Amino acid sequence: MSRGVDPSALPFTRFLNLCHYAMISNYDTIVYMVDPQEYGARTREVSQALMKGTPKPGEPPVWWDGDEEASMSGLLAAQQLGAMVR
């Protein structure tokens, strides 16, 4: 590294801090590498969702696709983490 830090010698928590710093320091470069139309579409989608406000108690958030989708995404995440899922 530029300051003479050996990442393999760091404790795990310090290594994660280093990874976070590397991601944040390159954020502007990464954002500009994204397709401008896609970036604009995602920005509009997020701003529209924020304009709807927070859901009332008992209502699902705007990004909720239903119980089936939530269940499948949870099972997929468990499989990717190595859990035995039937």
Image (spheres, grey):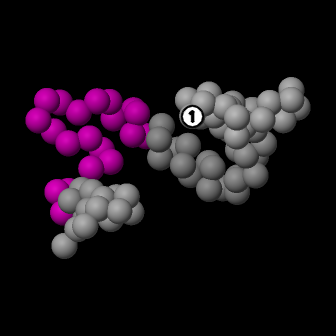
List the single residue furthest toward the front. Answer: 9
Front residue of 65 and 48 = 65
In the rendered image, which quarter is residue 18 located in?
top right
Q: Residue at x 21, y 59 (%)?
A: 71
Quadrant showing the N terminus = top right
On whether residue 32 falls in the magenta region, the answer is: no
- Residue 60 showing in the rendered view: yes
In the rendered image, which quarter is residue 80 located in?
bottom left
Q: Regarding mark 1 in the picture, which secondary structure is present there?
A: helix
Front residue of 73 and 86 = 86
Look at the magenta stretch and give its main secondary structure.
loop
Front residue of 73 and 7 = 7
- The residues colored magenta run 48-68
On whether residue 54 falls in the magenta region, the answer is: yes
- Residue 20 showing in the rendered view: no
Q: Residue at x 18, y 63 (%)?
A: 68
Residue 84 as seen in the image, left or right of residue 22: left
Residue 33 as seen in the image, left or right of residue 13: right
How many marks can you see?
Answer: 1
Residue type highlighted by circle 1: Phe
Residue at the disc numbered 1 = 12
